[in-house]
Amino acid sequence: MKNFMHSIPTRIAFGKGQIKKLKEMARTGKKVLLVYGGGSIKKTGIYDQAMEIMNENKMEVFELSGVEPNPRIESVRKGVDICKSNGIEMVLAIGGGSVIDCAKVIAGGAVYDGDPWDLVINPGKIKGALPIYTVLTLAATGSEMDKFAVISDMNKNEKWGTGSRFFVPALSVCDPEYTYSVSARQTAAGTADMMSHVLENYFTNVQGADLQARFCEGVLKTCIKYGPAAIMEPNNYDARANLMWASSNAINGMLSEGADVAWCVHPMEHELSAFYDITHGEGLAILTPHWMEYVLDEKTVDKFAEYGVNVWDLDKNEDPMTIAKKAIECTKDFFVNDLKIPATLREVGITDEKNFEVMAEKAAAQCANAYVPLGKEDVIAIYKAAL
Ligand code: NZQ
Ligand code: ZN
């Protein structure tokens, strides 16, 4: 196991009715920027609940609405302008990962003297941020309990992840009931996303990090059990609660610290979203089995067999390569048949190979230190297999 520094400073208020904890925001100041998306929080009533708490606490609320899925730098810039013109003291994000990510970079941009895109492409420039509060409405990215944010500039076909300790939310309200209204499609994509966060760490070259591996398997099994359950029965509290807590734990460092390795499927997917604006979790679900098939060989077979036995309950007495191949089949079958996510890039609107060269070059630059390092040609081969 490698050395690590463990710190997860976000306070999680988990469970029914926990939105009341937002009254703590009044200790930070009076002026808040409320950031939200296309309006789901108004339909579900979460907007009214949050406003009531902030009004009771005599807070002055400014709003940025309309944050897009795959949030755009233009929305960040609008939010930063509101903060700078009005002396905003904190940011409250109510929504899924897109809204939270946008709010994080707004919080950083509000105390930065320059264009916030600088903070996206150069995390070293993030020297501070306004305090960040979140109310999570979609279990997927784990942004409610991590330091990362992913922002797109669609004019340049660029989507980059950035991160800073200043972006870790101070408090996140995680009420599973708030996810009852999430569509089957977004529930599936969110489940695939959190599973991918786990798999990116589970397949590591670091030896001796057994506890992290067992944590990973626990989170994966939880997603496999409760993803389909939440789709079948959207108001199943335990299904929504398990998914919500899995989303935070998949990426908050507990599973990766001491065993971390560069991620590979995420950089490949971010290029798909940057060029074609597809849903992140769907892209991951399509690419993951093809990545698995591509990197399976004599060197990786034992890890894949361990995955098959411990996650998919395959027979440990079969030979490792047979178990490994069955494990990859189980993964694909789960995404396509249980979660009903499309199996090919073509089905999500990517119908030709014309951008694969440039996308693969950018993705491969981040895959050099991955579990199995991949170059540009490797990434192109995976894209073609997924097409
Ligand atoms: O905009 P509204 O109206 O709120 O609707 C959203 C949106 O259309 C809807 N939704 C959210 N909560 C809902 C709801 N609909 C009904 N009921 C609710 N309770 O769902 C749609 C998708 O929302 P979005 O926030 O885009 O989804 P997600 O949470 O999957 O976030 C995806 C973004 O996060 C990035 C992705 O790349 C993508 O840009 N990621 C962020 C990470 C991080 N910060 O650590 C890591 C991830 O790997 C990922 O890259
Ligand atoms: Zn992800």
Image: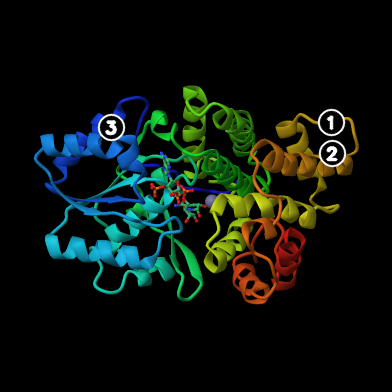
Residue drawn where x is 67% and y is 72% of the image? 356
Mark 2 and mark 3: span between their CA atoms? 45 Å
- Helix, strand or loop at mark 3: helix
Query: Can you identify the residue that label 2 sits on?
Result: 323
Whether ligand 2 has any atom under 8 Å from the Cβ at mark 1 is answered as no
What x and y, as percent, mark residue 209? 63, 41
Residue drawn where x is 33% and y is 56% of the image? 66
**N-terminal label among 1 and 3:** 3
Residue drawn where x is 12% and y is 43% of the image? 59
Q: Are marks 1 and 3 in contact (CB under 8 Å)?
A: no
Mark 2 and mark 1: span between their CA atoms? 8 Å
Nearest to the observer: residue 292 or residue 206:
292
- Above or below: residue 225 compared with residue 264: above
Query: Can you identify the residue that label 3 sits on?
Result: 19
**N-terminal label among 2 and 3:** 3
What x and y, as percent, mark residue 29? 13, 46
Quarter of the image with the C terminus in it: bottom right
Q: Could you tell me the amino acid type at mark 2?
A: Ile
The nearer-to-camera label among 1 and 3 is 3
Q: Could you tell me the amino acid type at mark 3?
A: Ile
Query: Can you identify the residue that label 1 sits on?
Result: 316
Q: Could you tell me the amino acid type at mark 1?
A: Lys
Q: Are marks 2 and 3 in contact (CB under 8 Å)?
A: no
Q: Are marks 2 and 1 in contact (CB under 8 Å)?
A: yes
